[in-house]
Image: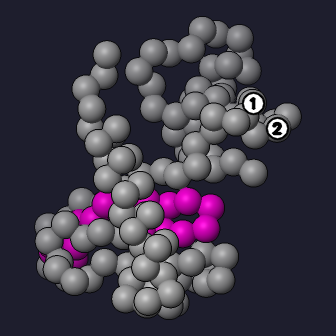
Amino acid sequence: MGLALTTDLAPTIVELAGAPAMPGIDGRSLVPLFARTPADWRTSFLIEYTTDIVFPRTLKMGYDAVRTERYKYIRYRDLKDMNELYDLLEDPFELSNLIAAPTATAARQQMEKELDRILASARAPLP
């Protein structure tokens, strides 16, 4: 199974149309997933939400998050001690925040590192 994103649609259509790949475009063609998941396919992806200043209830609610097939980790930018961790296999509706659960310490640390890695990669200048 592979993690597919809407940003993968344009590269997929381009490849199916037989056109050359577009350099610097977000996403990857999904064509390799139609047969089998390639070994180098993404295992996580970045989610970003910017604070919406139109609605006061969402002020300072911006966050960065990372999602894998099993977990979702959310790190709020301005709200202290409000981070969230969910085991999506056990809790697909995200009802039980595991951020402080001793049994989830290893998963939390792994997801924190993955978020830091993916943020650094996303913010690196393009060649």
| Image mark for residue 32 | 1
Q: Judge by depth and name the residue closer to the eye, 49 or 118.
A: 118
**Residue 120 appears left or right of 69:** left
Q: Is residue 67 magenta?
A: yes
Give the answer, above or below, for where 55 lies relative to 4: below
What is the span of residues highlighted in magenta in the rendered image?
Answer: 58-73
Which amino acid, mark 1?
Pro
Any part of residue 48 in sight: no
Q: Residue at x 50, y 87 (%)?
A: 103
How many residues crowd mark 2 within 10 Å: few (<14), some (14–19), many (20+)?
Answer: few
Q: Judge by depth and name the residue closer to the eye, 17 or 23.
A: 23
Q: Position of residue 39 (x, y in %)?
A: 70, 36
Q: Judge by depth and name the residue closer to the eye, 101 or 92.
A: 101
Indicate the secondary structure of the residue bearing disc 2.
loop
Q: Position of residue 101 (x, y in %)?
A: 43, 90
Q: Position of residue 5 (x, y in %)?
A: 57, 46
Any part of residue 2 in sight: yes
Q: Are marks 1 and 2 in contact (CB under 8 Å)?
A: yes
| Image mark for residue 36 | 2
Which amino acid, mark 2?
Arg
Residue 73 occupies which quadrant of the picture? bottom left
Q: Residue at x 36, y 47 (%)?
A: 117
Q: Residue at x 73, y 21 (%)?
A: 16
**Residue 24 appears left or right of 37:** left
Give the answer, above or below, for where 12 lies relative to 81: above
Q: Position of residue 98 (x, y in %)?
A: 45, 86
User: From mark 1 to mark 2, how far is it between C-alphas?
Assistant: 6 Å
